[in-house]
Image (spheres, rainbow, N blue to C red):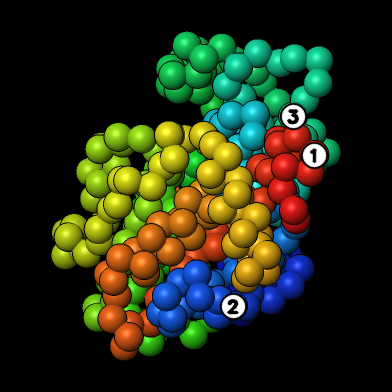
Amino acid sequence: MSNTQLSDNLIFQLPVVLQPLLSPLFNNISIDVLRLDAIHPIVSGNKWFKLKYYIEDCKQQEKNSIATFGGAYSNHIVATAFACKKAKIKSIGIIRGEANNFLSHTLQDAKNYGMELHFVSRNEFKEKETIKNKFDKNIYWVNEGGYGILGAKGAATILQTAPTENYTHILCACGIGTMLAGIVNAAQSHQKIWGISVFKNNHSLEQEIKNILPDNKQHSFEMLHQYHFGGYAKHPLALINWMNELYQKENLPTDIIYTSKLLFAVKDLCCNNTFSSTDKLLIIHSGGLQGNLSLAPNTLSF
Ligand SMILES: *Cc1c(COP(=O)(O)O)cnc(C)c1O
């Protein structure tokens, strides 16, 4: 058994399941959701997958700590803190924005997992190299969100968590697109890979994905840009209502930033006759539910 499989066992508290969507919401198209959210209550599945080869690389380079960047509600920050705790590596989080008296629940969790938090202003946060130079040379740096080739390599293993070869389409939410790059790398040649961007007008996204894909995969995906609901982390009432309806009809909890927008896109595409009755869709539920704790109590029915 490789190191990586051992680490998966350390993180997963529950097995990954494929949940079929059966309500009329999706126009009778055959759809399964890969429930990576269910593997751990706080550590989002997607972020663990993106991290695992960075952790292995850090150990191989014999560096003693991992540092990375993120905002106060970042799934990546809390996943890094948890994974490093499990791997017995010190973790450091460079957090965008001033510290206030009350840490967000995300940062509180990260801190509880042993992460050392450093707050920098929004302007300073943009100068990543300047920040890195202020720290010890023996630190292993991971890009914000786990962006990079090793992140994609880890995300590629998402498709090994369940039998995924027979789906015609695989759809996932995209922030910086590293998860999508991994899925593109691991998919069968007959499968179509579609990303749903959660940023408004992020038209450099395709190029950033191509930068971490091999030459023969540069055109192996499509990006949809019309499902952002106003932009990153924007969650108008229409989105909240959708999340509650989806939960009620499919027993599927989603997060306000990524997976609710993904599932809305899937519904919209199904209702617009994008797919045929022989298509089989795989939807990646990439986790992130901890982010919903930033909402006022009782906003969501789950
Ligand atoms: C980070 C994240 C994504 C997007 O992954 P990228 O590699 O940044 O595109 C999707 N879903 C959830 C829950 C995430 O936390």
Amino acid carrying label 2: it is Gln
Q: Which marked residue is nearer to the observer: mark 1 or mark 2?
A: 1
The amino acid type found where label 1 is placed reads Pro
223 shown above or below 114:
below
Q: Residues within 10 Å of mark 2 (few under 14, many from 20)?
A: some
- Which residue does the image show at 55% across and 31% down from the upper left? 69
Q: Position of residue 107 (x, y in %)?
A: 73, 32
Question: In percent of the image, x 39 and y 38: which residue is there?
Answer: 199
Could you say whether the residue bearing mark 1 is in a helix, strand or loop? Answer: loop
Tell me which amino acid carries mark 3.
Ser
Residue 235 % position (x, y):
55, 38
Q: Which residue is mark 3?
A: 104
Query: Mark 2 vs mark 3: which is more N-terminal?
Result: 2
User: In the rendered image of this protein, does residue 55 appear above or below residue 120?
Assistant: below
2 or 3: mark nearer the eye: 2
Q: Is residue 146 left or right of residue 9?
A: left
| Mark toward the viewer: 3 or 1 | 1
